[in-house]
Image: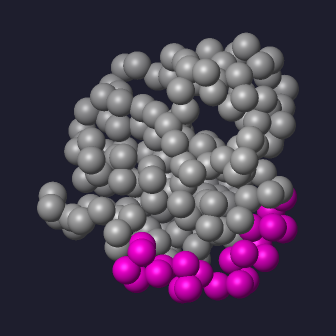
Amino acid sequence: MVHRIKEEDIHTSSRFLKKNDPKRKGLKLKEISNFLNEGHVSEIISEENFAKKNKKSINVFAHTIIYKNKKSRINNIVISPKTTERDLFELIINCIDYLIRNGSKEIELNAPSQLEEFFKNMKFEKIGLKNNSVLMKYTVKSDKQSSLSKKFEEAEMLKNISEKTSEQLLKQR
């Protein structure tokens, strides 16, 4: 089940990020915890952390930010070696639903290049490249857009995600 990270989850999430996010391996757990607790404050309306857990361990993590201009980002997507495509998909769907419910009109994310097709299948469009990652954008079609979770169930979008993407996700780790 995907959920917003609560204060009691900060320690577990910090350990997960330190272990699985190459950018945070050199940081102290306290520094990571402070970031999760405080985040950025200047032009941000809201920010939340999301994690997909199986039993007691976190499989995938993402940080969402909504800016005052109604644009938003899904940042710091961190996956563990145990992450499945379904885990990643459910996490991203929950992040998108949260961002749309809170007024976002445009959602951007950076993803590893090998996941480009995965995000295209989720209706993101490629808008640029940076290092070994691709910048993707999702544009909300209307204010009355139905829940993405319901669309997911109806369309069974996971059937459209190729086995190749799954292999690439596993190779990334």
Q: Is residue 98 above or below residue 82?
A: above
Q: Is residue 160 magenta?
A: yes
Q: From the viewer's perspective, is residue 18 above or below residue 11?
A: below
Q: Position of residue 144 (x, y in %)?
A: 15, 61
Q: Which residues are magenta?
A: 152-173
Q: Nearer the viewer, residue 115 or 126?
A: 115
| Residue 153 percent across, percent down from the top left | 42, 75
Is 22 drawn above or below residue 163 in the view shown? above
Count of number-bearing discs: 0
65 relative position to 165: left or right: left
In percent of width and height, residue 10 lies at 64, 24
Residue 21 coordinates in the image, percent (x, y): 76, 41
Residue 58's place in the image compared with 67, above or below, is below
Q: Residue at x 40, y 54 (%)?
A: 96
**Viewer-closest of 84 and 43:** 84
Q: Is residue 135 visible?
A: no
Q: Quadrant of the C terminus?
A: bottom right
Q: Is residue 79 left or right of residue 6?
A: right
Query: Looking at the magenta stretch, what is its main secondary structure?
Result: helix
Q: Would you say residue 96 sits in the magenta stretch?
A: no
What's the residue at 84%, 26% (across, down)? 26
Q: Nearer the viewer, residue 7 or 68?
A: 7
